[in-house]
Image (cartoon, grey):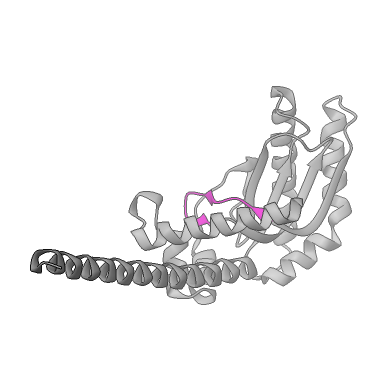
Amino acid sequence: MSKKNSGWGRKRTVVCFVTLAFLFLALGILMCEAGIAVKQAEELSQAVFRLHIVANSDSTVDQELKLKVRDAIAVEMEKLLETQENPTKEETMDLVTENIETFQNIGQSIVEEAGFDYQVTAMVCNQAFPTKEYLSLTLPAWDYDCLRVDIGAGEGQNWWCVLFPQLCFKEGIVGKLGPEEEGYIEDTLSTDTVEMITVTAKEKPVRVQVRFKIVEIIQSIKEAFRED
């Protein structure tokens, strides 16, 4: 073997070694970020209570009906929360569970007043949510506790909101977190998780964008297994 070929062989070995080292380093970083992302998603899942309203279909009238049901439920929720002083997530869930028939009847009344015979069902459950951006925060895709309201066949587009900490207001407006809600978020969640959900999409560091993408992929895998 010539010195030229021997030198080229050593160079290839070095290149392969460096490439593998970078690949293992990248894999290690990715696995570390995945672990952090899952931990943050679980932390959020334990801290918030959400609202999920599903329309009968995607027709214009059914979507408009969904918004009417949304508004009525948001108003009722505000009334119930006025009777509580700084309720926790668990207390909010208990309050909703105790009044689940009220929410269902409100939805049913709105539907019947609009001239439809759809059945409305309401329940407190834990289910998958997609990534959702609000004015004050962005919640990653994951499983969350929620009040779910299905109208009719429940095959239309969804409406998502957060009941605790409260982001649902009268007339279905999704607003910014108030001082109390901001305090709850900061006191309950880790600094990294607060940064993850409160920085706007355009301002999110690459590491935060990567974590959101990781939990979206993991959630889609979980959903695929559930369907099987």
User: Picture coordinates of residue 84 (x, y %)?
Assistant: 71, 67
Is residue 78 in view? Answer: no
Out of 225 and 124, give the one closest to the viewer. Answer: 225
Is residue 12 in view? Answer: yes
Q: Which residues fall within the magenta stretch?
A: 128-139
Q: Is residue 131 magenta?
A: yes
Q: Residue at (88%, 31%) from the top-left corner?
A: 112
Check the image and report above or below for 112 versus 163. above
Work out which quarter of the rendered image holds the N terminus and state it: bottom left
Out of 25 and 32, give the one closest to the viewer. Answer: 25
Out of 20 and 114, give the one closest to the viewer. Answer: 20
**Residue sitting farthest toward the front:** 1
Out of 150 and 182, give the one closest to the viewer. Answer: 150
User: Picture coordinates of residue 162 (x, y %)?
Assistant: 62, 55
Is 97 displayed left or right of 52 in the figure?
Answer: right
User: Picture coordinates of residue 185 (x, y %)?
Assistant: 52, 69
Q: Residue at (35%, 72%) from the top-left corner?
A: 25
User: Picture coordinates of residue 117 (x, y %)?
Assistant: 90, 29
